Image: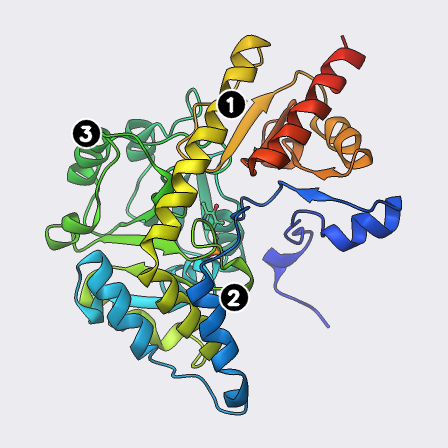
């Protein structure tokens, strides 16, 4: 069977190594995973209890319109219900946008390095990918504007950016939006929105009133701690969102996901608690890097990209043997870096201990 030309040689997504696999392979009792920016404190108990109550309803298809969750999210972020589209993770919203907008006549503009799914989905649709290098880890919006042409359909702003954790300021984003031609969709991927502390980070939802070519992506996978349930959403102009809907698979979220995400929104205490602990723990890691002269990118997220000046894959192997799964920078466009999720205090104690031993041994 011949698959589409553009799929030839495309790699599969390489997820963080699963914990059970590592335990078995290395015969370890305890494995700590700080590789995929999941919430180390889990998820709201309200969400977990809501799922338990649904267990006798598994035979019934979910509500394809996601009415319960839709209402909650609309109120929570202050938009109309018809401005929302839900995906099986925001990954699926990225896929739907590409499927709806891109053909082989078109192109997208992204930063480089950034989240891998923008490029992958564009390639699958046969579109061209124009990548503009980050500068000091940050999107160069002015340079990105320059490569837009008549065939450009989407320009992606990952804010904060994965894998650097850096952000685009409100001032930069506003001036950018003003200049993007109206035929180009601007996507602001805000997967780490809840973690952002910077005062000059753009609040994008109010901008939807003025810019019909803006779509915002948010997710329940990171701060809300529901990565396994796969819920993310896009927010945009009602007409555009409606026009996307035929691309969405009819039952793309489970009922369990709808109910858990809706309950998780009610528990903002859980979120603020996690966000606060994340900030404290991030500071510990940052202070350590400063003390040891380890370069890193200032992060507005729950992860830190640091330069150990050694091949990322070797550092990954070293940590793995000590029972820690981190992410090598090699596949992320930063060959001598590692990306580590900010864990709990106990997890970071172990991380710092292993890191100290690594620095000592490789001096
Ligand atoms: C994690 C992540 C996503 C995808 O999250 P889902 O689990 O699919 O909702 C999207 N964008 C960025 C930048 C991410 O880091």
The mark nearer the N terminus, 2 or 1, is: 2
Residue in the picture at 35% in, 58% down:
267
Above or below, 362 relative to 209: above
Q: Disc 2 designates what residue?
A: 229
Task: Give the Cα distance between marks 3 and 2.
Answer: 35 Å
Task: Give the Cα distance between marks 2 and 1.
Answer: 30 Å
Q: Residues within 10 Å of mark 2 (few under 14, many from 20)?
A: some
Q: Residues within 10 Å of mark 3 (few under 14, many from 20)?
A: few
Above or below, 182 relative to 310: below
The mark nearer the N terminus, 1 or 3, is: 3
Q: Quadrant of the C terminus?
A: top right
In this view, the residue farthest toward the bottom is 59
Q: Disc 3 designates what residue?
A: 171
Q: What kind of colouring is applied to the model shown?
A: rainbow
Task: Give the Cα distance between marks 1 and 3.
Answer: 30 Å
Residue in the picture at 19% in, 62% down:
237
In the rendered image, residue 207, in percent from the top left (x then y), is placed at 15, 48
Q: Nearer the viewer, residue 29 or 228?
A: 29
Q: Disc 1 designates what residue?
A: 284
Label 2 element class: helix
In the rendered image, residue 346, in percent from the top left (x then y), is placed at 62, 35
The mark nearer the N terminus, 3 or 2, is: 3
Residue in the picture at 82% in, 47% down:
29
């Amino acid at each position: 069977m011949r698959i589409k030309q553009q799929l030839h040689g495309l790699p599969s997504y390489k997820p963080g190594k699963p914990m059970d696999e590592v335990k078995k392979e290395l015969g370890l009792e305890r494995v700590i995973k700080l590789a995929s920016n999941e919430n180390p404190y889990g998820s709201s108990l309200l969400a977990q209890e809501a799922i338990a109550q649904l267990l006798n309803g598994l035979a019934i298809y979910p509500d394809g319109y996601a009415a319960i969750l839709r209402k909650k999210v609309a109120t929570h972020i202050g938009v109309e219900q018809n401005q929302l589209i839900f995906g099986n993770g925001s990954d699926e919203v990225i896929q739907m946008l590409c499927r709806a907008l891109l053909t082989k006549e078109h192109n997208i503009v992204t930063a480089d390095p950034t989240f891998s799914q923008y490029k992958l989905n564009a390639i699958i649709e046969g579109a061209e990918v124009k990548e503009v290098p980050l500068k000091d880890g940050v999107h160069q919006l002015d340079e990105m504007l320059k490569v837009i042409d008549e065939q450009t359909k989407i320009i992606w702003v990952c804010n904060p950016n994965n894998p650097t954790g850096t952000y685009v300021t409100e001032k930069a984003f506003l001036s950018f939006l003003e200049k993007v031609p109206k035929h180009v969709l601007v996507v602001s991927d805000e997967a780490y929105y809840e973690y952002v502390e910077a005062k000059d980070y753009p609040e994008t939802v109010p901008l939807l009133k003025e810019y019909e070519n803006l779509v915002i992506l948010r997710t329940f996978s990171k701060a809300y701690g529901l990565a396994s349930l796969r819920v993310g959403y896009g927010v945009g102009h009602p007409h555009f969102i409606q026009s996307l809907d035929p691309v969405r698979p009819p039952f793309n979220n489970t009922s369990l996901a709808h109910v858990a995400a809706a309950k998780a929104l009610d528990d903002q205490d859980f979120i603020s608690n996690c966000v606060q602990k994340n900030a404290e723990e991030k500071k510990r890691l940052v202070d350590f890097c400063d003390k040891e002269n380890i370069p890193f990118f200032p992060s507005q997220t729950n992860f830190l990209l640091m330069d150990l000046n050694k091949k990322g894959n070797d550092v990954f192997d070293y940590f793995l043997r000590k029972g820690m799964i981190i992410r090598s920078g090699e596949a992320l466009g930063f060959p001598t870096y590692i990306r580590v999720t900010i864990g709990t205090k106990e997890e970071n104690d172990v991380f710092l201990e292993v890191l100290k031993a690594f620095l000592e041994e490789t001096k």
